[in-house]
Amino acid sequence: MDHLIGTLGLLWAEPSFALAQALTGLAGASSLFLVAAGLSIVFGVTRVVNFAHGSFFMVGAYVAVTAIERLGFWPGVVAAALTVGLLGVAVEVLVLRRVYPAPELFQLLATFGLVLVIQDATLWLWGPEDMLGPRAPGLGGAVEVLGQPVPEYDLFLIAVGPVVLGLLWLLFRRTRWGVLVRAATADREMTAALGVDQRRLFTGVFALGALLAGLGGALQVPREAANLHMDLNVVAEAFVVVVVGGMGSIVGAYLAAVLIGVLHAFGVLLFPKLTLVLIFLVMAAVLVVRPAGLLGEAATPAAGGHGAGEPPLRPASALLKLAAAVLLLLLVLLPVIGEGYALVLAIDVLALTLFAVSLHFLMGVGGMISFGHAAYFGVGAYGAALAVKYLAAPAELALALAPLAAGLAGVAFGWLCARAAGVYLAMLSLAFAQIAWSVAVQWLEVTGGDNGILELWPGDRLGGMVGYYYVTLGLAVAGLLAIRRVAFAPFGQSLRAGRDSPRRVEAIGLSVGARQWAAVAVAGGFAGLSGALFAFAKGSVFPSFLAISRSVDGLVMVLLGGVQSLAGPILGAVAYVGLSDQIVRGVELWRLVLGAGIVLLAVAFRGGLAGIVRSWERP
């Protein structure tokens, strides 16, 4: 509080300093707007949530550093933007064009695979070292504004944002192509019925979006070194800007970028402990008040992102039951026939399988896309760790408290998440996960921050490694059976009905929102148990348990196995964890191999591994 009061006093006494901070925020807002504008345009027309958009920003930065050395600064920036635009054309024609008819979850899976491919391709071409770019010629100095030095390049970036916004406005309002883009944004089906070639239109839109992202990356080179972590860092912020402004709204994206940029600039001074999560707090607040963003249109109730309505769930076939029994027998005998490392890997697979199945309960049964399921995984892990550290609780009690803590988090988060739908729901869940992650990172006195909480071994009471393996096996199998039981129960059936036809469910007197709220709490509890099992297996818990990458792992496992099958996440978890372990140890560019496999699966095998197994069962 003293820090806040002191900083406010400084800003009040030194308005020139406050203005300089505001200008710094506006400069960052312009760079962020370039990325967010492209993302918003692409989503508005194609309805693709492009997770790989940050990769275009990263490639733009790397290409700019190379091109500037050979062509000079401004020609190099233009060359980088055009190169990334051509890369966008290749991505759209070769990959995304084949997944447009697919449900949005598979489009998300394909773009995540592209993230891995582009990241390792960038590593192969430019190496692992950060690459510093030169200053812009003629803009390397500073200008005195009310006695405060402001970099000339920042002033240039501040001007770029409105100029690009104006050019985009002219493009979409004063050209035939722009009118077609706006028409496709409003009603793609009617635009196609009028004879507009959607293939060319989509390719042009994606090229424009990629070009803007590449331009943003190229212009960022004088302020930030090109590095391999730029993609995920910027795409998270760009998603926040697009969602806060309203999906598909360019003006909304600019207003949101300015809001986020200025808040971030002053947040560093006023709320240093909230710096990591401030933008997600803003996004959560906006979506609670306006679920469609500042200038977005309210979403109409629709089926979830898994696809069209499905026939009722059917009991497992005799062949599937036999395979499950054989697998369970092998798992029971594993300590006898396997080595120590096999037990370690098996515990990881079991814990993450329960995590994936809990996420599938939300996505497959409930139709709710979650980008932040790691929040419950991490809350469960930290709940167990804190019980051991501060209450001296035995491992058995800590494992019992973990799902309770995560379930309560699900109750709190679920009440707000049930108010949103589609990509807004996904981003709201991401915001809550980032808030939880920020608490774990910055509440040093309790969580240990980045150092985590150590010495969480289950102890001799559970029988050492072998005993803990059997505990994990028992709890994981019990959790899987419980989730399956809930899915077949009337509650699960009503969730599926609300997913496929929410208006009809509401018409017969059932509350879709209340059931979704309860589903978040149930899934959160089981995810928390999986997090606690994973934490005891590792002997420690860190903020990475709550990170975006953990949520992405869950999404990939569900989609890899097949979102339309209850057995899908089990197959996906086993395949993803097992293959990741083998590929990481045996292949240098393992992300490229894994990403290519994920893209292939999204394009050619949309039923996932479970769909392939079902095809084998058919005569």
Image: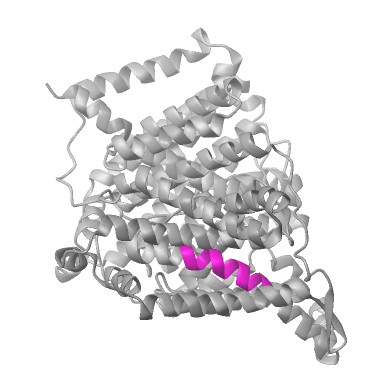
* Closer-to-camera residue (308/113): 113
At horizontal 51% and vertical 38% (from top left) the residue drawn is 117
> Residue 441, can we see it?
yes
On-image quarter of the N terminus: bottom right
At horizontal 21% and vertical 64% (from top left) the residue drawn is 196
- As displayed, is residue 323 above or below residue 315? above
Q: Is residue 491 left or right of residue 482?
A: left
Which residues make up the magenta segment? Answer: 27-38
At horizontal 36% and vertical 42% (from top left) the residue drawn is 94
- As displayed, is residue 564 above or below residue 58? above
Q: Is residue 160 left or right of residue 178?
A: right
Q: Look at the image and say whether residue 34 sits in the magenta stretch.
A: yes
- As displayed, is residue 269 above or below residue 614? below
Residue extending farthest to the right is 147
How many badges with numbers are in the image?
0
Q: Look at the image and say whether residue 556 sits in the magenta stretch.
A: no
At horizontal 74% and vertical 46% (from top left) the residue drawn is 130
Residue extending farthest to the front is 71
Residue extending farthest to the left is 619
> Residue 361, can we see it?
no
On-image quarter of the C terminus: top left
> How far from the left and from the top, in percent, is residue 549?
56, 46
State the image quarter where residue 17 is shown: bottom right
> How far from the left and from the top, in percent, is residue 469?
53, 24
State the image quarter where residue 127 is shown: top right
